[in-house]
Amino acid sequence: MPHLAINGATPVRTIPFPTWPVYTEEDAQAVSDTILSGKWGSSKGDRVHTLEDQFAAFQQAKHGIAVTNGTTALNLALQSVGLTPGDEVIVPAYTFIATANTVLMSNAVPVFVDIDPDTYNINPDLVEQAITPRTRVIMPVHFAGLPADMERLKDIARRHHLAIVEDAAQAHGAQWNGKGVGGIGDISGFSFQASKNLNAGEGGIILTDNDELAGIAGSLADCGRSDDGLWYGHYRLAGNHRMTEMQGALLLSQMARLEEQCKRRHENGDYLTEQLSRIAGISPTIRPGQANRHARHLYVFRYKADAFGGTSKSKFVDALNAEGIPASPGYSLPLYKQPVFLEKNFGVYMQEALREIDFGALNLPETEKACADEAIWISQSVLLGEKEDMDDIVRAIAKIRERRQELARE
């Protein structure tokens, strides 16, 4: 008789976890009120500007510039620090494609660096090794909402006269040494895309403590205008990347519950780590002491097939889903193995600039292992449940581990 749900037995859990997004009538009313106001663009209303101030304050940053999406936020942040064609930007290889794409979109060269296996964030030791005379920016990703080692990265940047552009797309509410991420480096970008911990379907925001960079980013987001210039005065080559008032209203309404959600994700994530660390073959990514708040956009742990009878990661994920636990294998490819990089399908100019780089020859071992064999993700909405819900995750994994031979026989 089978014991695992993937083989027909009763699953550990049969009720759903919390779903995403969380919304109320107040959210709908906030958007409706904005529509009825007739002020739909941020140049006429005050919702987006209020959001900029409130979200910047939430992350303990001085300035916020709301834009159309997270990719745009990162692209404009990179442009704001003064990249020139052919400059190099150091990025992790285990992240969403936008991190590297925005470098290319700025006519710069992404230099891929491996991750620290304990955190899945960029490895500072390898960052320093990757610096060349052409390096201009370090672009750490606060992956899954865990702050990167900003102390070490800032020290490296200071010694080598480099800018830091934080990719904080997944890090709403995250803190390093008591300071909200996004205002620790020179400038940053957040995403409000549908899966994010604060979301309006799409949207993004640039944060910075630097007055000059805030002025440049604001101009780049608004057709090259200047705060002290004419409305039809345009001072930079720039597009229109402004957020709508409806998005601003929805995000402001959603922010009313963000702090409570941040605390719950953080606490449930720490509880899960404590419990799962007791199961052989399961190694949750660690939260360094300086990362006093983890945003937990994803809960991430490493899976060791040897401890599960040699069962592949993909089959383990299938078994976990069958037990009623929504899990994902995460990124299947390192960024440098994405077709866009293997085929160099990014325009004539950048094809020529990167002509001598063979992305297919790269092999960053920790990133490769994360993609192929180890990384398991659980989405942030699951962490909005109760402690009893977290216990179901633990029970399901422990059950699969105990009955691993049942999978190995398949």
Image (cartoon, rainbow, N blue to C red):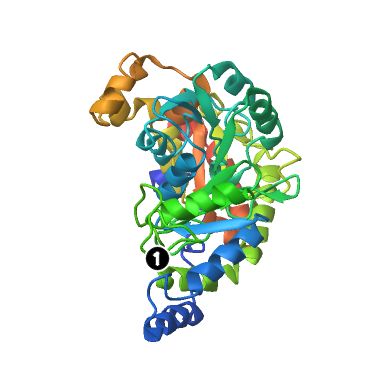
- Determine whether 365 is above or below 154 in the image: above
Residue 131, position as x, y percentages in the image: 55, 19
* Amino acid at circle 1: Trp
| Quadrant of image for the N terminus | top left
Q: In the picture, residue 158 is in which quadrant?
A: top right
The one of 307 and 284 positioned closer to us in this rendering? 284
Q: Is residue 190 visible?
A: no
From the viewer's perspective, is residue 76 above or below residue 286? Answer: below
Compare residues 118 and 57 and report the one nearer the observer: 57
Give x and y (percent) for residue 299.
Answer: 56, 46
- Whether residue 301 sits left or right of residue 176 in the image: it is left
At horizontal 68% and vertical 56% (from top left) the residue drawn is 60
Q: Which residue is mark 1?
A: 231
Q: State whether residue 316 appears in this view.
A: yes
Q: Nearer the viewer, residue 93 or 396?
A: 93
Is 75 positioned to the left or the right of 156 in the image?
Answer: left
- Residue at 44% from the left image edge and 56% from the top image edge: 195
Q: The C terminus appears in which quarter of the rendering? A: top left
